[in-house]
Image (spheres, rainbow, N blue to C red):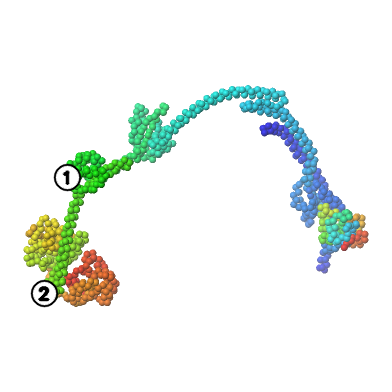
């Protein structure tokens, strides 16, 4: 029981679930992308692809489970910290603001319509055309 | 430079004011106005921007709509009007700086910027984002914008100012500078500078007229100046000549003053000049030294107050009054002595000369003052020295005269006047032959001349006879010189009166003769008994003359005693001469003493001379007297009486009379002998002398007897009186008083005891001389004395340690250990000195020797030679002691 409570408490912290989702993207260059490179992209440290497409990070809404997972994986912190991180770098003009959508479906739809957009899926299967190669 | 100053002074006023106004307007006021406007505009723009940023962030937080954020924040970075933008979020009630643009803006910078009016902020309220956005407008942007807007205005202003300056310079060149030149020319003329002509470069007609007028004025003045210069030159030459004459006169006057001043200052005498009111107007250095007042102190002071003593002030005032009234002053122009007053109040002698000098209408009194204290003192000293010398020479007990080269007397001392019975006035200035008419004058003057001629004179004895009295003088001469530079020579003659010395010399010669006679007599008197002793001693050993042995012995004994008496006489007289003869009084039985007085020549004279003793009032009397010395006196007198009496009688009379506590004894020894002439009466009492030398030869004797008697009687406070008639006889009388000890009615008969025996006496005799040892043995043999003989002090000590003695006779003078050392050792033997009397046995017969030996611890002193009778008496004394001790 005690272990359950501990695990439950830790479960709210995305950092404990530092697991990368499945990357999806549209017309990314270069590929394949390592996890580290993916982390750099989802931390806003890359703003343009080699093929000159702007890097657009697409995330589920800030109060969604997926957002928390991405925060735990990329920043090894919670959703609020990840949100503050993005606000900080956007405020300094170092990165384009991410796009927040309500579901992974909307995420897939947005990526499909915008070149250079990249997201992580945790629940939905990845369409082949949007698959991002990883080593 | 002057020109430039003038220019600047002229253009600075209006142009400067205008330029400053323009600069203030264009450079400060307008930009500030524009800047304020821009600031308001920018502030409004910033407010809008921050508001938009806050709204979009709020939307992003609330609705996850970040679509505007990228655009807005990208724009921030590129806005030059923005200093910074800061995103502050609240977490748990605390505001945290999350991001800034540009990066690295600190919270401190934000806090500081809050006071700036370009600082604006907007709250964020969106979802989890709670906080504010803050931005600060850029001042640099504002300034650059202001400058950018003002640039055309500044350019326009610069153009205007340049145009104005150019216009002014054109005006300056055409009008101001020529006017300046005119003014300069006028000022030069006013100041007298006519060296340059007036030539102004101008095209203005009025200025050209002014130029001509000024130039004409300059030429007129130039001409006038040349005229004045000629006049001035003449005047200057005249002034220079007069100045030169005046300076020469002044120099001469100054020289004269300096000379006068130097004379006054360097004068050897004090110089004091006073005016008619006796106020001092001049006071030289010597006056400062003499009186002690400095020149500054003295000037203006009254003479009476400063240097005239109190007692002379009235006279001075009267003299001055008299001079003012009559013009006469007895003190003027006369050198006289008086007294002056020093600063310290002491007065001193001065020599004063006063004269009057008229200076203008003023008459002053010049005083020349010389301090004659030292001179007076020297004069007094000289006079005193002269008196001392005179007193010394006059007081000397010798004749002293001085003669000059002409042999005339220049000095005769009092002693010479007295001895020569002359007056000084009769001798001074005269030669010897003009004063004295005696036979020695010629010789004396010859000797004087010889000494003047450089010969040495030896003193001569000279007899001077005055009034029938002759005196002996020792006369000497020598030259003396007086003075150092120009010495004057005198012949000094001295004369000592040696009459007394002559008399003494005669007496000494007489005494020497007497002494020689005495020595001859003594020699004879010693040799005579010695001859008998020596010869008879040898005859005693001749067996064939045994029958005469008694006679020989008697003769030897008599000669020996005679010899001893003579030695004693000589010693006594020697003591008396040296004042060392002393009496040793003790209790004396007068009866016993008189009984012991016997004729002393009984074995020399025949029975033709009888001896009569007349003793009265002396029975039972004991006095305190020196029996030995009294006996010596009487024995001498009796001896003489018998000696000089061939036949008749010798009488001794003694009359004793008691006077209270004293007993007076009158002695008279008379004989019927040869008597003494009146001429010889004085001599006989002197030492060494008998009536005449023939007496000694006839009767023998040293002649010391009566001399010793006289000395001894002097010690007894008595005097020998001589009564004698030649060929009839002589009587010697004297009276002596002795302290009375006792006086009995009748004398108790003397108990005579039989001859003593000394077998019970054990005596140690310590003597190094063998003959003396034999003598002692011979003397003791008849009495059976138990005699032990030791030859040295050391042997005596050993004997005394081994056995006891009743008495010890210890010779003093012995080799190795003498008697004195021996008794010191004997005193260290336990109880020895308490039980055994030790007597010194010595030939040292002086009384001080007695005292010395007794003080050393000797029990008594026996004197050599010791006769058997004396030894017997000595032993008898110890036998009595022995018996009394034993009893």
Q: Which residue is mark 2?
A: B547
Vertical placement of B217 versus B420: above or below? above
Q: Residue at x 85, y 52 (%)?
A: B70
Q: Which mark is residue B86?
A: none
Does dot 2 land on a helix, a strand or a loop? helix
Vertical placement of B587 versus B542: above or below? above
Does dot 1 land on a helix, a strand or a loop? strand
Vertical placement of B764 versus B460: above or below? below
Front residue (pair B860, B198): B198
Viewed as shown, does residue B227 lie left or right of B377? Answer: right
* x and y percentages locating residue B125 in the rendered image: 82, 53
Viewed as shown, does residue B1 lie left or right of B640? Answer: right
Q: Which mark is residue B466?
A: 1
* x and y percentages locating residue B738 in the rendered image: 16, 62
Task: Report if residue B446 is visible in the image.
Answer: yes
Kindly report the distance in space between the C-alpha atoms of the residues bearing marks 1 and 2. Answer: 77 Å
State how many labels appear: 2
Vertical placement of B554 versus B172: above or below? below
* x and y percentages locating residue B574 in the rendered image: 20, 61
Chain ID at mark 2: B
Chain ID at mark 1: B
Task: Report if residue B305 is visible in the image.
Answer: no
Of the image marks 1 and 2, the number of the one nearer the N terminus:
1
Within 10 Å of the Cα at label 1, are there few (<14), some (14-19), or many (20+) other Cα atoms? few
């Amino acid at each position: 029981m005690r272990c359950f409570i501990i695990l439950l408490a830790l479960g709210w912290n995305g950092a404990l679930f530092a697991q990368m989702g499945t990357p999806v993207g549209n017309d990314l260059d270069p590929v394949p992308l390592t996890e580290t490179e993916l982390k750099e992209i989802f931390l806003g440290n890359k703003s343009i692809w080699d093929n000159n497409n702007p890097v657009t990070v697409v995330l589920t809404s800030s109060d969604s489970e997926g957002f928390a997972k991405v925060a735990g994986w990329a920043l090894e912190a919670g959703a609020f910290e990840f949100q503050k991180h993005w606000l900080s770098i956007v405020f300094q003009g170092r990165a384009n603001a991410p796009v927040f959508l309500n579901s992974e479906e909307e995420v897939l739809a947005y990526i499909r319509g915008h070149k250079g957009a990249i997201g992580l899926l945790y629940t939905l299967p990845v369409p082949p055309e949007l698959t991002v190669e990883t080593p | 430079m002057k020109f430039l100053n003038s220019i600047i002074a002229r253009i600075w006023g209006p142009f400067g004011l205008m330029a400053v106004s323009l600069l203030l307007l264009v450079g400060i006021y307008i930009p500030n106005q524009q800047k304020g406007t821009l600031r308001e505009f920018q502030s409004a723009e910033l407010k809008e921007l921050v508001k938009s940023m806050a709204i979009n962030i709020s939307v992003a937080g609330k609705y996850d709509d970040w679509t505007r954020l990228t655009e807005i924040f990208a724009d921030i970075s590129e806005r030059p009007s923005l200093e910074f933008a800061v995103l502050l979020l609240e977490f748990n009630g605390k505001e945290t700086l999350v991001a800034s643009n540009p990066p690295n803006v600190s919270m401190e910078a934000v806090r500081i910027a809050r006071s700036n009016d370009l600082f604006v902020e907007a709250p964020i309220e969106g979802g989890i984002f709670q906080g504010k956005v803050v931005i600060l407008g850029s001042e640099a942007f504002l300034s650059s914008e202001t400058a950018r807007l003002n640039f055309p205005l500044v350019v326009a202003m610069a153009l205007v100012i340049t145009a104005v300056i150019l216009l002014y310079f054109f005006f300056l060149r055409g009008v101001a500078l020529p006017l300046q030149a005119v003014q300069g020319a006028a000022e030069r003329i006013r100041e007298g500078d006519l060296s340059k002509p007036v030539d102004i470069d101008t095209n203005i007609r009025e200025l050209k007229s002014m130029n001509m007028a000024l130039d004409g004025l300059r030429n007129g003045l130039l001409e006038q100046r040349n005229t004045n210069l000629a006049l001035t030159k003449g005047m200057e030459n005249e002034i220079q000549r007069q100045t030169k004459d005046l300076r020469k006169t002044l120099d001469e006057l100054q020289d004269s003053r300096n000379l006068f001043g130097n004379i006054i200052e360097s004068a050897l005498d004090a110089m004091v000049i006073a005016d008619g009111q006796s106020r001092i107007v001049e006071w030289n250095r010597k006056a400062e030294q003499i009186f002690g007042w400095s020149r500054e102190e003295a000037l203006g002071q009254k003479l009476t107050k400063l240097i005239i003593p109190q007692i002379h002030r009235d006279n001075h005032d009267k003299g001055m009054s008299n001079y003012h009234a009559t013009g006469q002053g007895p003190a003027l122009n006369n050198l006289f002595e008086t007294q002056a007053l020093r600063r310290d109040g002491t007065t001193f002698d001065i020599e004063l000369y006063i004269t009057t000098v008229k200076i203008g209408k003023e008459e002053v009194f010049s005083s020349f003052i010389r301090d004659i204290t030292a001179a007076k003192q020297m004069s007094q000293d000289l006079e005193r020295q002269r008196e001392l010398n005179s007193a010394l020479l006059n007081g000397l007990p010798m004749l002293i005269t001085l003669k000059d080269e002409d042999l005339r007397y220049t000095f005769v001392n009092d002693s010479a006047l007295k001895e020569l019975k002359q007056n000084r006035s009769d001798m001074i200035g005269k030669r010897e032959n003009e004063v004295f008419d005696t036979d020695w004058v010629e010789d004396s003057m010859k000797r004087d001349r010889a000494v003047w001629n450089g010969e040495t004179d030896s003193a001569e004895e000279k007899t001077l006879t005055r009034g029938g009295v002759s005196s002996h003088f020792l006369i000497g001469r020598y030259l003396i010189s007086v003075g150092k530079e120009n010495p004057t020579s005198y012949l000094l003659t001295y004369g000592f009166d040696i009459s007394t010395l002559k008399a003494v010399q005669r007496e000494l010669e007489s005494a020497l003769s007497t002494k020689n006679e005495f020595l001859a007599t003594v020699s004879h008197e010693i040799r005579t008994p010695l001859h008998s002793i020596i010869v008879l001693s040898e005859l005693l050993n001749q067996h064939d003359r045994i029958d005469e042995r008694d006679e020989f012995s008697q003769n030897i004994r008599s000669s020996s005693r005679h010899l001893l008496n003579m030695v004693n006489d000589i010693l006594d007289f020697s003591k008396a001469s040296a004042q060392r003869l002393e009496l040793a009084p003790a209790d004396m039985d007068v009866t016993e003493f008189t009984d012991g007085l016997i004729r002393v020549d009984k074995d020399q004279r025949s029975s033709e001379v009888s001896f009569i003793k007349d003793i009265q009032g002396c029975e039972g009397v004991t006095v305190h007297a020196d029996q030995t010395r009294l006996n010596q006196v009487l024995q001498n007198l009796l001896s003489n009486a018998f000696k000089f009496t061939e036949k008749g009688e010798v009488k001794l009379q003694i009359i004793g009379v008691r006077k209270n506590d004293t007993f007076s004894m009158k002695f008279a020894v008379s004989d019927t002998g040869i008597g003494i002439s009146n001429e010889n009466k004085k001599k006989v009492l002197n030492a060494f002398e008998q009536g005449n030398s023939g007496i000694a030869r006839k009767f023998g004797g040293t002649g010391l007897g009566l001399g010793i008697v006289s000395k001894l009687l002097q010690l007894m406070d008595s005097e020998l009186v001589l009564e004698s008639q030649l060929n009839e006889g002589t009587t010697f009388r004297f009276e002596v008083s002795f302290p009375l000890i006792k006086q009995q009615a009748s004398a108790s008969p003397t108990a005579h005891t039989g001859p003593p025996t000394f077998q019970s006496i054990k005596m140690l005799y310590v003597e190094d001389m063998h003959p003396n040892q034999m003598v002692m043995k011979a003397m003791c043999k008849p009495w059976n004395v138990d005699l032990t003989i030791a030859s040295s002090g050391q042997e005596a000590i050993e004997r005394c340690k081994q056995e006891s003695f009743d008495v010890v006779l210890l010779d003093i003078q012995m080799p190795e250990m003498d008697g004195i050392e021996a008794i010191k050792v004997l005193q260290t033997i336990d109880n020895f000195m308490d039980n055994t009397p030790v007597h010194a046995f010595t030939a040292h017969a002086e009384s001080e020797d007695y005292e010395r030996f007794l003080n050393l611890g000797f029990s008594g002193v026996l004197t050599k030679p010791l006769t058997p009778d004396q030894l017997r008496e000595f032993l008898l004394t110890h036998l009595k002691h022995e018996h009394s001790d034993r009893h």
